[in-house]
Image: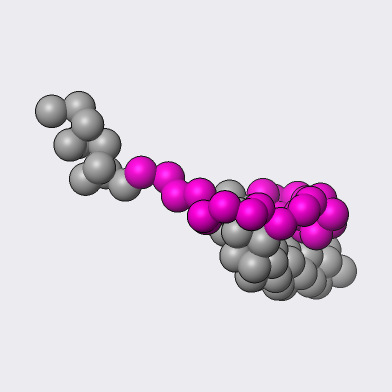
Amino acid sequence: MLPKVIAVWGVFAIAVACIAGVVAGIKRRDHSFWAAWSFLFPPMVLVLIAMPRNKGPRLKRPGLDELEERGA
C-alpha cells in the first residue's frame, strides 16, 4: 500500500511541477523557482495561478559567466 501512495505522490508532484513551469513561463516568472517549489509543495501552483502576469521583460538570474565578469 505505501509504495503505491509514494509512487502516486511522485507522479502527481512531477506533473504539477511541469504545469507550474509552463504557467510561470506564460506569466513571465522564473520557471525553475516555481517548478521546484511546486514539486516540493504542490499547492504552490495555486499561488502562481492567482498571481498577476508580469508586464516587463522576463526576470533572469545571472549565469556563472556573468557573475565572474562582475567580480573580476
Q: Is residue 46 magenta?
A: yes
Q: Residue furthest front?
A: 55
Q: Quadrant of the C terminus?
A: top left
Where residue 14 sits, quadrant-wise, is bottom right
Q: Residue furthest top?
A: 71
Q: Which residues are magenta?
A: 36-62
Where residue 26 sits, quadrant-wise, is bottom right
How many numbered marks have been drawn onto this rendered protein structure? 0
Residue pictured at 17% horizontal, 36% vertical: 69
Asked if 3 appears above or below 68 in the picture, the reply is below
Q: How is the image coloured?
A: one colour
Asked if 53 appears above or below 16 in the picture, the reply is above
Position of residue 48 measured from the top left corner of the image (x, y, whole percent): 76, 54
Residue pictured at 19% horizontal, 36% vertical: 68
Position of residue 58 measured from the top left corner of the image (x, y, whole percent): 52, 55
Left or right of 38, for residue 43: right
> Can residue 14 be seen at all in this image of the molecule?
no
> Can residue 8 be seen at all in this image of the molecule?
yes
